[in-house]
Image (cartoon, grey):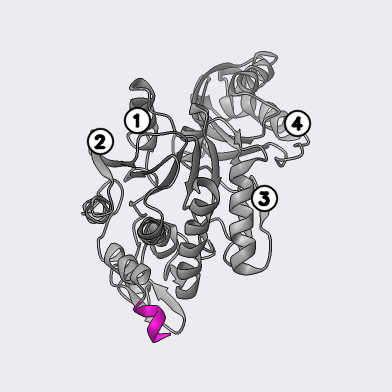
Amino acid sequence: MNDAIKAPVVELLCDLIRRPSITPDDAGCQALLSERLRNIGFTCETLRFNDVTNLWARRGSASPVLCFAGHTDVVPPGDENQWSSRPFEPTFVGDRLYGRGAADMKSGLAAMIVALETFLTEHSDHNGSLALLITSDEEGRARDGTLKVMQALTERGERIDWCVLGEPSSQHRIGDMVRIGRRGSLSGMLTVRGVQGHVAFPQHADNPIRRFAPILAELHGIQWDEGNQHFPPTSFQVVDIRAGVGAPNVTPAELSARFNFRYSTEWTHESLREKVESVFDAHDIVYELNWHLSGEPFLTEPGDLINAVSNAVNEHTGNPPELSTGGGTSDGRFISPAGADVVELGPVNASIHKVDEHVNVEDVITLTKMYRRIMELMLL
């Protein structure tokens, strides 16, 4: 274990954890990574959009481009008194390293950098180009990070062919699951309008709760689809409903609600919106419905990248990974539409966003080897 603690990738991971990079503050993480990358021949460019810092680093000008992507920002630690150790002080306990961002996703970043360093020591004349896309706006609104960088790259004619995201994709052991796509995420912000009145005289009022209730039941009763070969069924969830004026004898004049679809490739966001609005329009209700699209579903089809990632995992664990599109959203939703094949391979995700977030030290070392092997299979 002492040797593992002293491994270059673990030392870099500890340096990153010490930087309290709560969204959107990068806290110097990208500067640290840029210094390492410049030393191995990368041209590093900082792209700032509002208060978000993004790093685009590239080595080479030829195609194809293999990009590693991720984020330096982390979620807040919450009540630090609940932590067994200080969240921004890396702490070793047994075979684990504790700290905010240890799994999501500073271990992935550290593994990328050290994998690049060791790969280029022996293969500086590799085919194609290597790149990194690192943002400090993944855990937050995600509007000034990878989305804006991809727009800037597209405008100047730069293309990513293959992308490996270091998100914590593994479920129980390192490499047991690789994400090859993600469901789309579409949110609806609803306002239902009525007329406030006394509960004893409903004939003189128009209760928006009563108007919305049958529509809500209908939406919950719809089987949106059965999924398909790669995606689970589309889900509909209401996350917030508010109404009332604070008095038990008054019906409200307005109801607000928010709901979300995690949807498969059986839908587009346009067709899903049309379906929902048709349900509302079939009822006697005065409403306003605004929409927010977090990302369309994306899928990487079987090919060179999936083969390389699967082989790298198999070689270092003895087991091929499960290929999945489950989970929430990731910045892959911004990279894939530009034509890149995108996969996600990272550490075990059981502790992410929790108190006492941690990662297995040996897993970080193994992940570094996997990333290097992917480069060998794709660019040699």
Circle 4 packing at 10 Å, graded few (<14), some (14-19), many (20+), is few
Q: Which residue in the rendered view is the most extreme toward the front?
A: 125
Comes first in the chain, label 1 or label 3:
1
Query: 45 or 115, which is in the foreground?
Result: 115
Left or right side of 233 for 304: left
Left or right side of 168 for 56: left
Q: Secondary structure at mark 3?
A: strand
The answer to which image quadrant residue 328 occupies is top right
Q: Which dot marks residue 222?
A: 4
Of tags 4 and 3, the one toward the viewer is 3
Depicted 104 relative to depicted 249: above or below: below
Q: Which dot marks residue 323?
A: 3
User: Disc 1 versus disc 3: distance between alpha carbons?
Assistant: 28 Å
Q: Which dot marks residue 365?
A: none
Comes first in the chain, label 3 or label 2:
2
Residue 5 part of the magenta-drawn span? yes
Magenta region: which residues?
1-6
Q: Are marks 1 and 2 in contact (CB under 8 Å)?
A: yes
* Residue at the disc numbered 1: 148
Comes first in the chain, label 1 or label 2:
2
User: Disc 3 versus disc 2: distance between alpha carbons?
Assistant: 33 Å
Circle 1 packing at 10 Å, graded few (<14), some (14-19), many (20+), is some
User: Disc 4 versus disc 2: distance between alpha carbons?
Assistant: 44 Å
Comes first in the chain, label 4 or label 3:
4
Q: Quadrant of the N terminus?
A: bottom left
Of tags 4 and 2, the one toward the viewer is 2
Query: 164 or 258, which is in the foreground?
Result: 164
Q: Secondary structure at mark 4?
A: loop
The type of residue carrying mark 4 is Ile
* Residue at the disc numbered 2: 47
